[in-house]
Amino acid sequence: MPTSTVEDYLKAILLQEGKSDSDLVTMGQIAAALDVAPGTVTAMVKTLASSDLVSYEPYSGVALTDAGRRLALHVLRRHRLVELFLVEVMGMSWSEVHIEAERLEHVISERLLERMDEMLGSPSVDPHGDPIPDADGVLAEPRLKSLASCGVGEGLAIARVTDQSPDFLELVEKRGFKPGARVVVVGRDEAADAVTLRLADGSVVNLGDRAAAKILVRPVERGPARTPAAGPSG
């Protein structure tokens, strides 16, 4: 059975692959994601390569093998299902479940995971809008764009929040930008690097482009928008 450290590394590589334009993930990217020293990463990557979980090119980077990807996707599925379960069933805030899921993803049994999936109705996304790999390890990544890149007049639905630090999630919740919320871009201030948005309740808010870039959206037909039901706040 893989150790929690092995699972953490494989999941980190998987997530970094999704952010990179290159086929390889660098030691620096992994080190930053896991908050460890680059030398520690290199030693661990060599261990993973010896177990055929990654392919390693010295001075270039690593890529998951088929076996490594299957394991990484399963760990990611556990993590995101646990997050959703903690919010929907346990009533925890979406801003605090990431740390708890980091612990539980390594110890949850397959039987319990399947039961949680059934209770939640085989969900496709977690509380932050991140896609949940299915039981076969298929990860559907819809093409989304950020609020920072949307044009004036576009009707949108919040689909995903990529920055899951507690402070940012609390800001998103306070501003009404949780996944499912409907917004319309009503203005852009290029000099201030900000976007002006109208929410479903008619309120108008300004959001800096730096924050807007962390909120992904999908287009929706213009029409009556509704405010999503408030989830548990913990």
Image (cartoon, helix red, strand yellow):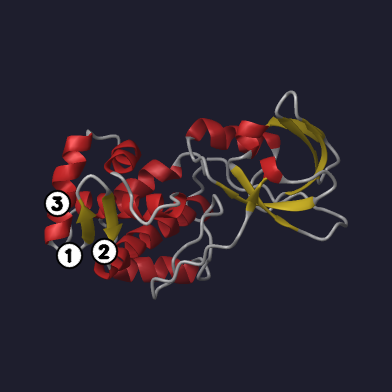
What residue did someone put label 1 on?
52
Residue assigned mark 2: 68
Query: Residue drawn 37% across and 49% down?
Result: 101
Q: Judge from the rendering whether residue 121 lies leftward or rightward of residue 172; answer left or right.
A: left
User: Which residue: 60% across, 60% down?
Assistant: 143
**Seen in the image, is 155 located left or right of residue 73?**
right
What mark, if any, has residue 185 been given in the picture?
none
Q: Quadrant of the N terminus?
A: bottom left
Q: Residues within 10 Å of mark 1 (few under 14, many from 20)?
A: some
Counting residues from the start of the chain, the first of labels 3 and 2 encountered is 3
**Mark 2 touches mark 1? (CB < 8 Å):** yes
Residue at (55% x, 33% y) in the render: 168
Question: Could you tell me which secondary element the residue under label 3 belongs to?
Answer: helix
Nearer the observer, 163 or 147? 147
Q: CA distance from mark 2 to mark 1?
A: 7 Å
Q: Position of residue 81 (x, y in %)?
A: 43, 59
Most distant residue in the bottom direction: 136
At a point 29% along the width and 58% down the height, the residue shown is: 63
Q: Which residue occupies the foreground of this view, 51 or 111?
A: 51
Pinpoint residue 155: horizontal percent, then vertical percent.
80, 52
Q: Which residue is mark 3?
A: 46
- Where's residue 24, x and y in %? 33, 53
What's under tag 3, amino acid-wise?
A: Lys
Name the amino acid type tagged 2.
Answer: Gly
Residue closer to the observer: 99 or 20: 20
Of pointers 1 and 3, the one earlier in the residue sequence: 3
Disc 1 and disc 3: Cα gap in Å? Answer: 10 Å
Toward the front, the furthest residue is 59
Q: Earlier in the sequence, mark 2 or mark 1?
A: 1
The residue type indicated by label 1 comes to Asp
Q: Mark 3 against mark 2, which lies toward the viewer? A: 3
